[in-house]
Image: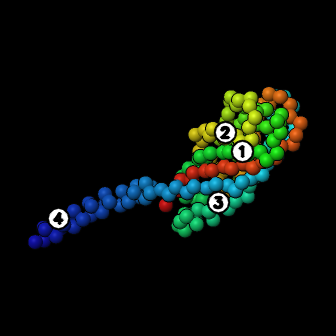
Amino acid sequence: MKIFYRSLGFVALLALGTLAPSCSKVKDLITINVPLQTADVQFSITPQPVGTQTLSTFQFGINIDSVLKVENSSIGTGNIKKVKVKSITLTLTNATQNDNFGALSACEAGLASNTKPDYAIFAGLTSNPDAYATTLDIPVKDVDLKGYFSSTVLYYKLTGTTRRATTTTLTGKATIKFDIEAGL
C-alpha cells in the first residue's frame, strides 16, 4: 500500500509538472479582438501644387486603456498583442468639379503617437483614377501598429501626389477602423 501511495504521489507530481507550463501556454492562446473606430476625425487639405507633398495632418485624442476595459475589465494597453488597421475612408464635404480626390494620382496614410513620433505608413493607393470622387478608400497594408497604442494621442498624416493643382481648401472627415488583439 505504501508503494501505491508513493506511485500515486509521483504520478500526481509528474502531472502537475506538465500541466503548470501548459496553463501559461493556454493563457497565451486566449485573445480578445476589440474593434476600434476612431470617431470621424475632421481634416482639411489646403490648395496644392502639382507634385508629391504632405496634404494634411490631423490628430485624435483617445484613452485606449479605457476602450479596452469597456470590452474586458481585465485587459489594458499592456495586454495588446497586435493592432492592425481594417480600413480608412476619407470623405470630402466641399468638393468641387476640379478639386476632389480625382486630383490625386496616389496617396498614403501614416500614423504616429505622442509616445512614438515616427510615422508608420499603414495604407497606400498608387493608382487613383482621374475621375470626380468625394470618397476615397485607401487600401490598408499589413502593418502591426501595437507600439503606437500605449499613448493618448494619435497623429495621422496624409501624403499624396497631385496630378493637377487645386485651388480650394478641401474639408472632410476620416474614418479609421482598427482591429486590436489583446490577451490575458
Position of 53 with respect to 140 (left or right) is right
Crowd class of label 1 (few under 14; some 14 to 19; many from 20; radius 10 Å): many
The disc placed on residue 7 is 4
Outermost residue, left direction? 1
Callout 1 amino acid: Leu
Tell me whether the residue at label 3 lies in contact with that at label 1, contact meaning CB atoms closer than 8 angstroms.
no
Callout 2 amino acid: Ile
The disc placed on residue 90 is 1
CA separation in Å, label 4 and label 3? 52 Å
| Badge 2 or badge 4: first in the primary sequence | 4
Q: Secondary structure at mark 1?
A: strand
CA separation in Å, label 1 and label 2? 8 Å
Callout 4 amino acid: Ser
| Badge 4 or badge 1: first in the primary sequence | 4
Quadrant position of residue 104: top right
Q: Name the front one of labels 2 and 4.
A: 2
Tell me whether the residue at label 1 lies in contact with that at label 2, contact meaning CB atoms closer than 8 angstroms.
yes
Tell me whether the residue at label 4 lies in contact with that at label 1, contact meaning CB atoms closer than 8 angstroms.
no
Q: Name the front one of labels 3 and 1.
A: 1
Crowd class of label 4 (few under 14; some 14 to 19; many from 20; radius 10 Å): few
Residue drawn at (10%, 72%), measured in percent from left and top? 1
Position of 26 with respect to 136 (left or right) is left
Residue drawn at (88%, 40%), measured in percent from left and top? 168
Quadrant position of residue 45: top right
Q: Which residue is mark 3?
A: 64
| Badge 3 or badge 1: first in the primary sequence | 3
Callout 3 amino acid: Ile
Q: Secondary structure at mark 3?
A: helix
Q: Which residue is mark 2?
A: 138
With respect to residue 45, does 3 lie above or below? below
